Image (cartoon, grey):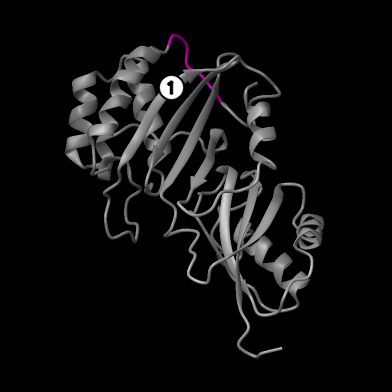
Amino acid sequence: MADDYSQRYFMHLAYRGAPFHGWQEQPDAVSVQSVLEGALSTIAREPVKIVGAGRTDAGVNARMMVAHFDLHRPVADLASMVRGLNTLVGRDIAVYSITPVHPDAHARFDATRRTYHYYTSARKSPFFYPLTWLESRNLDFDAMNRAASLLLETEDFTSFSKLHTDVKTNICHVSYARWHSTPVGHVFVISADRFLRNMVRAVVGTLVDVGRGKTGLEDFRRIIEAKDRCSAGTSMPPEALYLWKVEYDYWKPDNIGVSGDSRFFDF
């Protein structure tokens, strides 16, 4: 075997965010990245580092996450590797597939579009509360959708970004933003080329203020134009937020996990 052998892979996975301190590895805390790297290193019998398509915050879920990693030994049976990983990562992470990709493929920088869902329930339920946010009474979702449409006209999302982050720009291009009804409540769906840290939860919190009548449409526009996080609404709880889909020009996951989990979230 050549010493310079290397193969890059894309991993398609999902996870429940509550048990983890976010995606990114950090000292003295359990993260999704650290659990996966430990399991991969054990199975591959070499140190393995992974790069995710995004860095979800503590408590945020992912119905579809993509990560890439390199291995320096050939893998005879990728399906067996997936099964092995699922025995090691615990019940809050599901690895669906591992696919060989070209050497320059990058899970984060090559993603062209990401979609998040934020789920609500209209009534109190002991079954939905770990995965949804209990709606305030009499929210005006029509007004919330009118305000959400302004996001498609916006590029600078500073007002919805966590303060003191290390990003170089707060420019994002939102291609979809709308509330939809579900059998038990509502879901806010938002797609963009990239998202800032805490952006979706801040957007949803500000839209909820619109739905309560606390913030008008022109107020929402002024919040965007202010480019000031302090002018926007409260950040919403993380457990109702899901990284729903990550898209690439050259790669698509199989339907394992994607179609089945979608039916579950129809409630």
User: Which residue is found at the position 59% from the left and 71% from the top?
Assistant: 49
Q: Which residue is mark 1?
A: 179
Instruction: Looking at this view, name the residue that lies furthest to the top.
Output: 138
Q: Is residue 253 left or right of residue 118?
A: right
Depth order, front residue of 18/182 = 182
Q: Position of residue 122 (x, y in %)?
A: 55, 14
Residue type at the position of mark 1: Trp
As drawn, 69 above or below 132: below
When asked about the image quadrant of residue 201, the answer is top left
> In this rendering, does residue 108 appear at all?
yes
Q: Residue at x 48, y 37 (%)?
A: 116
Residue at 18% x, 30% y: name it: 222
Is residue 5 located in the magenta-colored stretch of the structure? no
x and y percentages locating residue 137 in the rendered image: 47, 11
Q: Magenta region's main secondary structure?
A: loop
Q: Is residue 172 left or right of residue 132?
A: left
Asked whether 134 falls inside the magenta stretch, the response is: yes
Residue 177's place in the image compared with 56, above or below, is: above
Task: Point out the stretch of residues depicted in magenta.
Answer: 133-138
